[in-house]
Amino acid sequence: MGLRRSGKSSIQKVVFQKMSPNETLFLESTNKIVKEDISNSSFVQFQIWDFPGQIDFLDPSFDSDMIFGGCGALVFVIDAQDDYMDALNKLHLTVTKAYKVNQNVKFEVFIHKVDGLTEDSKMETQRDIHQRANDDLTDSGCEQIHLSFHLTSIYDHSIFEAFSKVVQKLIPQLPALENLLNIMISNSAIEKAFLFDVVSKIYIATDSSPVDMQSYELCCDMIDVVIDVSGIYGLQEEPEAPAFDNQSSSLIKLNNGTILYLREVNRFLAFVCILREDNFDRQGVIDYNFLCFREAIQQVFVNSIQPNEMACNGETSAASSKTEPT
């Protein structure tokens, strides 16, 4: 959600339909609710509803219960290059309306189009929007509503980074996945590891060390290279066969002594990690540990869909797997 021309449709097209950022300049303004189901081509199992900016919550035809009742996350987009006072008023009206219907909604504010701002302006704009939005909630007695803020642009990887953090909040198995990644990197001398959704390049989990944007961009670029090369030179039995399958893997050595390592987890997920070339002298150990990791991942999701089972059961099952990492 957000005001007109704030960049909502452009974000959706770039992240989930691989549209070039420059092509979004020709998108027409959204004049009705557009629903996109991405569960068929992605690990991320949800629908995205793109709302027109001129939507009126006071209109009797607006069904708040239907709109917000099953909502997991509400992403409100604010144009950082425009006067955002009207957007802040709309943000307050939107989140308070949604919270009355569904208190489990995650509220995410994308401070968008920051590519046109200096670093100082970005920080000042984020601080000002953060302060004003929270003050509005406090003044109206809604201190319990929590807003998360992200600086985004479709012209760099910041929009994928922001969407990654949004999606992670909707995955109940996240603690188990993070734990498995921590075990994997500690037993394999890996510096940083991600579990990527291949289609959107959203990372659904990473280890507990801080995410460095440069490392994240390297991993995203590696996925693009693997899919593009596989699509051209891969041994596909059928023309429509996916370029990413159980044979997909890649090893890239950079000239600074760093190695990028990619393996397929399932047809939607890829394990991508960064490690020093000095620590890659025992590739067989890393390959074996990855097989243990992939088996544990499968156990997490198998157990998580069992009736009356909590997500933590998946973590327990994975931790007690008979196959132990070396």
Image (cartoon, grey):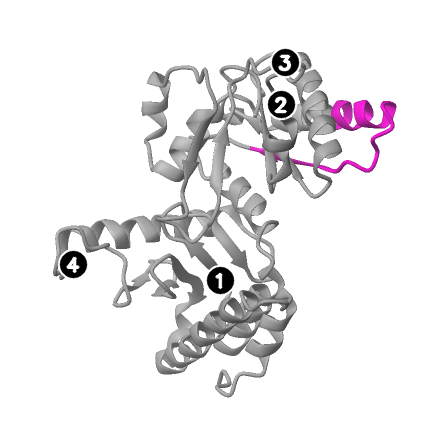
Q: Is residue 42 above or below residue 22?
A: below
Q: Are marks 1 and 4 in contact (CB under 8 Å)?
A: no
Q: What amino acid is labelled 4 in the image?
A: Gly
- Coordinates of residue 186 in the picture (x, y in percent): 55, 74
Q: What amino acid is labelled 2 in the image?
A: Ser
Say which residue label 3 marks. Answer: 59
- The magenta segment: 130-151
Q: What amino acid is labelled 3 in the image?
A: Asp
- Give whichever of discs 4 and 2 has the lower sequence position: 2
Mark 3 residue element: loop
Q: Quadrant of residue 103?
A: top right
Mark 4 residue element: loop
Visible residue check, residue 275: yes
**Disc marking residue 193:** 1
Q: Residues under labels 2 and 1: Cα distance?
A: 32 Å
Say which residue label 2 marks. Answer: 121
Q: Residues under labels 3 and 1: Cα distance?
A: 47 Å
Mark 2 residue element: helix
Say which residue label 4 marks. Answer: 234
- What residue appears at the point 68 percent right and 13 percent down from the top-left corner? 85
